[in-house]
Structures are given as structure tokens and as C-alpha cells.
Image: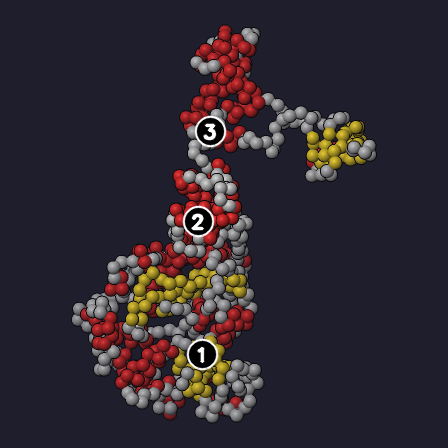
Amino acid sequence: MSGAGARVGVGARFRYDGETVEVVEMASTTAGNEVVLKDARGQLLRLSLRELLFSDRAVIVPGEAGPAGDDAEEIASVVLGQLTEAERATLLERAAHVREVLTGFRSGTAELAQEGEPRPEYSPARPLEARYAAKAAELGVGHRSVSRWAAQFRSGGEAALVPAKETRGKSASAVDERWVETAVEVMVEHADQSRPSRTLVIERTRARVIARFGEGVVPQPSRATAFRLLEELERRHPLFRLSTKRNRDIAGRPEGPYGKLRPTRPGEYLVMDSTRLDVFAFDPLTLKWVQAELSVGMDWYTRCITGIRVTPVSTKAADVSAVLYQSFRPRPAGRDWPRHAVWPEHGIPRTVLVDVDAAEGPGLASPPLVPETLVVDHGKVYVSEHLTSVCRRMGIPIQPARLRTGRDKGPVERFFRTLREDLLQALPGYKGPDIHSRGERPEDDAFFFLDELEAIIQEWTAVVYHHRPHAGLVDPGLPGLRMSPAKMFEHGVARSGYIEAPRDPDLAFEFLRTKWRTIQHYGVEIDRRRYNGPALNAYRTTKSPYDAPVKNGWPFQTDPDDITRIYFRDPDSRRWHSLVWEHAPSVRMPLSEDALAFARKLASSKYRYPDDRLAVADLLERWNLGLGTTLAERRMALRLSREQAAIELPETDEEVVVSLPSVRKALGTQQPNPEPEEPELPGALETGDDDDADLEDLADEDDFYADALEDV
């Protein structure tokens, strides 16, 4: 076997800085070994031997043949690693025979000689040709085969004895390269289209090759060869085997190495996304089956869910802002939640606290985090002026993901899948991830209202998801340890040393939607609703200092979940004030924009000249607990009575004053005596009212709505 080493001495040649040089002298000095090099022009160069051997500027030129890094043969570990157990045993047996021929011992050395070795016919004293003939007679092969094995073993060891595998059939390399490139071109063009057949791709490839190169210039493969070729190209550009959505995702992969955000502490990256849930829900407002949409915020480092919002059909910018606000101010935990699912008020886990009992109380549903960077996609609600302005004000930069690249928000996409597989598919009304997985009539089983579905998801997240080990949550120092999001939050707090908290509660008003309106003598009018308050007295006849989109417009913050009041900041004192809707005294519960629109629609079908006060009064009369005619309407009234606003705003001075009993009495808005609790209905389940009697006829949607909306 030829050696891999090369002699370094006088006469050795190197390629130094692109020129061929020869060693003409070597000397030992106090600084170390040095060499003198001479180039083709006769110029001499003196440098250390260390630099000559280890510098990237010099490469040795071997004087005789030997192994090199650019050899066409694969290395021994690669060749031997492709063998099966049977092929490996055959190879070892053949190598033992070759070593016996060359040395007389099957192991190749006398120190490991077996009993009876060396055998007389393979004695090293005999001629090599005689030993070849003896081994050929023993194995029943030709003399030339044994001599070839010996030559291969001398040159490459055991790996050289592996027989070359024959390739069966024609591969892509056996077809004209121009035909292959054209086929790949046609397959790539169908990445964003519906899935074609293999025959269509072959015919289009042949037609394009003829049109591009001419008739008969490029040899056309047979139909069987073309099919085998497409099977090989399928690995490079999937088109026929997987779903079209999956093929588009693979085609959109980046060509270079994948990048990855590596958060180092809680709150560094907050990932937000929305998805349509695979369950039908019941809208308590319009009494229709709707497709719920879930918006969440997830801390990338801990995988903790910091905000949850379930909305019907389409998510609005105000809903996304509400999810972001929950990261600052989480919702309170449920009363019956287990202790391990409740976060302390300040968000630090119990194991970090010195006094655990001091943190006992109602607690929070999720850890409060002030995000440093927001990672979103290019959805309209995430690039809206509302959300971007809020993030700019809060000092939160927005990092948009790449277009149609779901892997940029991989953790939250994985959460959606976990939610579907572990929770949603066990709920009534589950319809599956696609049309092919849907049941016959899943909407007939839907029972949960939107707010109930949101409460279920929030409780499952706090009780189960936050405390289950996650395969992606690891500590590089302990790679075998799998932590849950709650444990990862404790790890992050201990690692980063601090958490941030909102510096001012009044910043919550900036998460609301801004509307520009003029201040009139009667107040402010928004969508045919009039608002007024003492805070407007100084500005009713004053020119607006803002460069508003409407002439002489002033900014007002509105909450679509509660239209009974809007919020106005005094330009002089910079304090927030609430302006009350003129019909708010007749509303004893939060009223949303959708609820008012529905009430107006009901009133217009009943009265000739309806107004908002009449519409709201009629709607509340239908939804009143004592006057509701159906159990479904009673469930709607219960839902509205306990409805929480998406953003819990701090109280303004006007709200504190109006809540005084004397003021309410003077304004004629004294709360009536609380009604006695309604007795439990006979036959009702402990978990709630039985609505089967009212919901059993929902198969005929028109008949159900006619009965639900008829006059009481």
C-alpha cells in the first residue's frame, strides 16, 4: 500500500503563494527549524519550517503517487458502511483468504496465528504464484481472480475488495441533460398550480424540447424511462406524491442554510398568529353557527401563551391589540383552577419566591411579560396602523416573517397543532383540519358559545399545556432534560435576573382604536352614537391642534367590545377622561358594536321609526333573564352579564363619580333591586341548562331563525 506521507527535505517541492518552489537548504536556529526555498526564477526565500507545513499559503507537491483528498474513490468508512451484514461477512472472509495468501496467516500476522498456521501450501517460503494457484484451487475460482484480489488489497485494504454495485435501468444521468433540465423546468412551473399527471409533464417536456432545440436534436427517452426519470426528479421537486399545499411549502424553502432565532430570556421575542379553529361554535349574538378564529401570543423562549382571544370568522386589529395587552396585564385565573396553574400577581413563579404564602390570591391566568420584539406574519391585522402605532408607542419593534413561510413562526404553529390534537378534537362540533376529514353534520353537535370556547382553551393552556414537558425546551448545559413552559419560565427568570412590568396603567388606553371626530355643542358622534362629558366643556368651540384626517378633528379611543363609553385625553392636563353614551343609563351590561348593529336590525323590522334607545331596550328585553322565552336566549343573557372586556382599562375620574349612589339617583340611573335567583329548572343538568329542546331543529336554519327572532 502506498503511504499517505511525503518526505520533506532538500529537493522536496511546494506550491507557495501559487508558485512552485523547491527546498534547497534546511537549518536549525535558535528560533527553530528554517528552510530556504528557490523558485523558478532562481530567487531565494527563507522562512520557518512551521509556516511551510501549517500555513494556508503553502501546499506540498508529492513526488510519487498516493492517496489524496480529491480521489474519485470513496473513503473506507463510506464503502464499508453501505454493506449489509451478509455482504460484510463475505468481505471479511475474502480478506482473510487474501491475507493468508500474502502472509501465510489469516489474521495477517504471526502473533495472532491460528492452530495449524501457516499451512504448507501457503508458507511464506513458497513462491507467490504457487500460493495464488493453491488458493484458486481451494476456493474454486480462477488464478487471475486471486491475483486481482491481492493487488486490490495491497492498494486499498479491505474496502478495495468490495465489488462495485451495478445500477439497473436508466437513471437521470443516462438521459440527455437538456431533456432533464426541461423536465425540471416544467415541474417547477406547476409548484403553485393544481397537481398535473406524469403523462402531462412528459408531453409538455417533449413539446418544449422540440420547440427549443428542434426536431430530432435531443433524443427523447422512452415512456418507461421518462417515468423512472420523473420518479428520481420527484425527490428534488415534489409534485406528484404529496399534497399540493405541502409541495408549495417545500418549493418555498430557502436554498441556503436555515436561520433560527435563538432567544436567551423570557420576553425577548413574542410570536403572534391567528388561525381558524377546527370546531364550530355558537355566536350568542346572531344565533348562528360560526367558525371561530383563535389569536394567541407566545413567548418564544418559554413557549408560554401570554394572550388568547377567540373571535367569530375574522380577527380585527382591536382583537390582536387585546392579545398583546394581555401580555402586559394577564386576565385573572379561574376560581376553580388548580393551584399549579395560577401565576402570582407579579408573574414570578413560586419556586423563586421566598414567601410563597404571600403570593396567594386570585392570581393570573398567564405570566405577564413586556415583549422586546414582536414576530408576526403579513396578515392585514398584524400590519395595520392600529397595531404598528401601539408597538411604536410601547417601543416594541416588529419583526415580520417571510411571506408564506410558516416555519418562521414554528413554535406557535406547533401549538395550534397540539391544541387541535389534544383538545379540539375531543369537543363537540369538531370538523377536522380539512374538508376530507369533516363529518356528515358536525354543526349539529356544536354546543359551546364563543366565550365558553375561549374559557376552555385558556384553562387547558394553563392547566395542561404550561406544565407538560416540551421537546423543544432544552438547556444546552443539560441536553437530556425536557422542561415544561412553566419550568422554562423559572429557568429564564433565574438566568436573566429580572422581569419587566408596565410602567404606567394609563398606557392601556393606547391599545384601543383611535377615531377622529369633531367636538360639537352636543358632544361627539361616532356611528350615530352621541357621547358627552364634562371633559369636553373647554374644547367645544376650540380649534383642534391636531392635523387630523377630518377637518377640526379630535382623537378618541374606542373599544368595540364596550360602546357605552369612549375615552378622551385632555391636551392640557394629559389625563384621560371617559365620555358616556347618551343611552348608556338604560344599558346595565357591556354592549358591543355587533350587538348594537343586531339590535338596530331587529328594531327596524319591528318599528317604523326606531332609534338606538328603543332598539337596545327591545334587545335587552328579549335577553332579560326573567323574560327570555327560550333557554338559548337565557344562555345569551348569562353570557352578556358576565362578559369581560378584552382590555381591562383603569378607571377614570368620571367613572368613580358616576358610580356614587347619590349621583346615580340624581341622574335617574339608580340600579333596581337585584332580582331573586331563578329557581333551578326541573331536569336540568348540573353543568348548565339543557338546550336540546331549543337546538334540536337547527338542521333547518330558516325555521330556527324565524322562531328565534319572532316578537315576544
Q: Which comes before the other along the chain, label 3 or label 1?
A: 3
Q: Is residue 431 left or right of residue 657?
A: left
Circle 3 sits in a helix, a strand or a loop, which is it? loop
Q: Is residue 167 left or right of residue 31?
A: left
Label 3 crowd (10 A; few <14 / some 14-19 / many >=20): few
Of the numbered discs in the image, which one, if any, rests on residue 204? 2
Label 2 crowd (10 A; few <14 / some 14-19 / many >=20): some
Q: Is residue 259 above or below residue 270?
A: above
Task: Name the residue beneath numbered marker 3.
Answer: 165
Asked whether the beta carbons under mark 3 and mark 2 sit within 8 Å of each other, the answer is: no
Q: Is 684 in front, or is 546?
A: 546
Expressed as whole percent of the image width and height from the top left, the position of residue 470 reads 42, 52
Q: Is residue 129 above or below residue 704?
A: above
Whether residue 30 is visible: no
Of the 4 image quadrants, the one containing the N terminus is top right
Of the numbered discs in the image, which one, if any, rests on residue 558? 1
Q: Name the residue: 31% across, 71% down.
A: 283
Q: Is 141 in front, or is 664?
A: 141
Label 2, label 1: how many angstroms apart (C-alpha)? 58 Å
Expressed as whole percent of the image width and height from the top left, the position of residue 536 reads 49, 88
Label 3, label 2: how many angstroms apart (C-alpha)? 35 Å
Q: Is 208 in front, or is 125?
A: 208
